[in-house]
């Protein structure tokens, strides 16, 4: 089968990683429970930052957010390694900016994710991401962003939403923990 995966907040716990970095950088101690109840993707509001300040903070912190010790979600790495061993095709489709694409690919390889260069797509906007997903004729696609998944509902790909506090209002097949993967694809 052909499986497609978003990276950030689907395979790796990027926003929570960034939240901890923000606490450190801003010398604050905002509790993790605040992060876990956010109803939007952006994480800056609990730190008292405006949208503009939050965007600036995110952009100037990308190097540290993307390439430090951001952990994969429990069982995500092992799940993809198992899919690879079973001979399934794995595609990564991320909206990470183009200037971070090749380095992200190398970081994913170093982390242990099974990456085939020709199956790693990056540097596109969400609507472009959807077009790539359609062209790949995937069997399953996993993402955390409702805007991406909602545009695929009339396609043949089975979409699965990776549970996050900001997407719980969406009624789609949902994966809370990667341990659930095998049951979802049955």
Image (cartoon, rainbow, N blue to C red):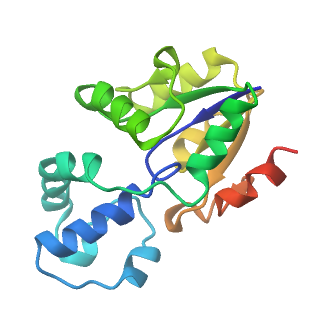
Q: Residue at x 27, y 83 (%)?
A: 30
Q: Residue at x 42, y 63 (%)?
A: 40
Question: Which percent across, then down, holds residue 66?
Answer: 28, 47
Counting every numbered tag in the picture gives: 0
Quadrant of the image occupied by residue 25: bottom left
Residue ranking furthest to the right: 186
Which quarter of the image is occupied by the N terminus? top right
The answer to whether 18 appears left or right of 121 in the picture is: left
Q: Is residue 157 visible?
A: yes
Question: Which percent across, then down, holds residue 100?
Answer: 26, 31
**Residue nearest the viewer, comparing 6 with 116:** 116
Q: Residue at x 31, y 25 (%)?
A: 102
Q: With respect to residue 130, does 146 lie above or below?
A: below
Question: Which percent across, then down, holds residue 93?
Answer: 49, 30
**Residue nearest the viewer, comparing 142 with 11:** 11
Q: Is residue 171 visible?
A: no
Q: Residue at x 88, y 45 (%)?
A: 186
Question: Which percent across, then down, holds residue 50?
Answer: 17, 66
The answer to whether 139 appears left or right of 55 in the picture is: right
Q: With respect to residue 40, does 181 lie above or below?
A: above
Q: With respect to residue 44, does 60 lie above or below?
A: above
């Amino acid at each position: 089968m052909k499986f497609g995966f978003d990276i950030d907040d689907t395979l790796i716990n990027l926003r929570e990683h960034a939240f901890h970095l923000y606490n450190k950088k801003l010398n604050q101690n905002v509790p993790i429970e605040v992060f876990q109840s956010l109803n939007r993707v952006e994480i800056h509001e609990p730190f008292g930052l405006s949208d503009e300040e939050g965007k600036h903070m995110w952009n100037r912190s990308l190097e540290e957010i993307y390439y430090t010790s951001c952990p994969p979600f429990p069982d995500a790495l092992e799940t993809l390694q198992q899919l690879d061993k079973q001979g399934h095709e794995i595609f990564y489709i991320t909206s990470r900016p183009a200037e971070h694409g090749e380095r992200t690919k190398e970081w994913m390889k170093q982390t242990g994710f099974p990456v085939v260069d020709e199956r790693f797509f990056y540097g596109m906007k969400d609507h472009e991401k959807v077009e790539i997903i359609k062209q790949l004729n995937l069997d399953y696609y996993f993402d955390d962003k409702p805007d991406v998944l909602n545009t695929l509902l009339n396609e043949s790909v089975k979409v699965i939403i990776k549970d996050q506090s900001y997407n719980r209002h969406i009624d789609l097949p949902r994966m809370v923990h990667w341990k659930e993967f095998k049951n979802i694809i049955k």
